[in-house]
Image: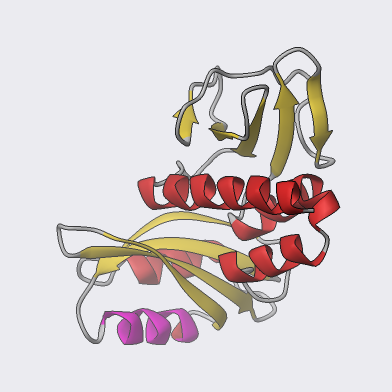
Amino acid sequence: MPYLLRVELPDVPGSLGRLASAIGEAGGDIEAIEIVEKRHDGTAVDDVLLETSPGTMPDSIVSVCNALDGVRVVWISRYAAGGNLFLDLEAVEELTANPVEALDRLIDLLPITFRADWAARVGRESGTIYATQAAPSDLTWQQLGKAARLETDDDNVHCGARLNKHEVVLLGRRGGPEFLDSELARLGHLVALAMSISRAG
């Protein structure tokens, strides 16, 4: 069963090796690791895509990780996308392959790229223009400048970025984790690139 683990750990040599060893001893097999954020306080946030052996419970992996000095599991969830983590550059390559459909393709790619549950393009007057299947049906246009976290009435987390004067891109996760500053910056760049690519088409 594939899982995605988000973990905070000291940004020092050997930390990742200790984490990998602990995950292995608990019955997890690491498929891919992506550095999400490096912080000024000397910690890093990594996303770890892993497979578990039969009978291995995710709680046991969380426990062995949290037992490591300076390590904290932020979040663990089943990861239905499978395969490797989808990097931003791969997303850009997909967008440039068909500029005419770049804005809709961006929406398709964002949940994979950011390990989120859904994404949508929402117009100021037209409402939802294009969305992934899991997107809520009641999305509304948001006044946005740069990419930002959005307030919600439940434990879901949303963020968004302005696409143009009349449209925004919204992205959501059910139950977390919170979108980090580095993810907001990446979202802003990808949305701006998608807009430029679509104009070139």
The answer to which image quadrant residue 117 occupies is top right
Q: Nearer the viewer, residue 139 or 106?
A: 106
Q: Give the image location of residue 119, x and y in percent.
A: 70, 40
Q: Is residue 36 magenta?
A: no
144 w.r.t. 89: above or below: above
Which residue is rendered at x = 17% and y = 58% of the image? 40
Q: Give the image location of residue 103, x and y in percent.
A: 75, 45
Which residue is rendered at x = 84% and y = 50% of the image? 101
How many numbered badges does the structure rendering display? 0
Q: Nearer the viewer, residue 56 or 156?
A: 156
Quadrant location, the N terminus? bottom right
Q: Nearer the viewer, residue 145 or 115?
A: 145
159 w.r.t. 110: above or below: above
Q: In the image, is 38 to the left or to the right of 113? A: left
Q: In the image, is 194 to the left or to the right of 35? A: right
Q: Give the image location of residue 16, x and y in percent.
A: 34, 81
Which residue is rendered at x = 72% and y = 26% of the image? 122
Q: How is the image coloured?
A: secondary structure
Which residue is rendered at x = 48% and y = 79% of the image? 26
Q: Nearer the viewer, residue 193 or 45?
A: 193
Q: In this orientation, does residue 21 appear?
A: yes
84 w.r.t. 38: above or below: below
Q: In this orientation, does residue 87 appear?
A: no
Residue at the extreme left: 41
| Magenta range | 15-24
Q: Give the image location of residue 22, x and y in percent.
A: 39, 81
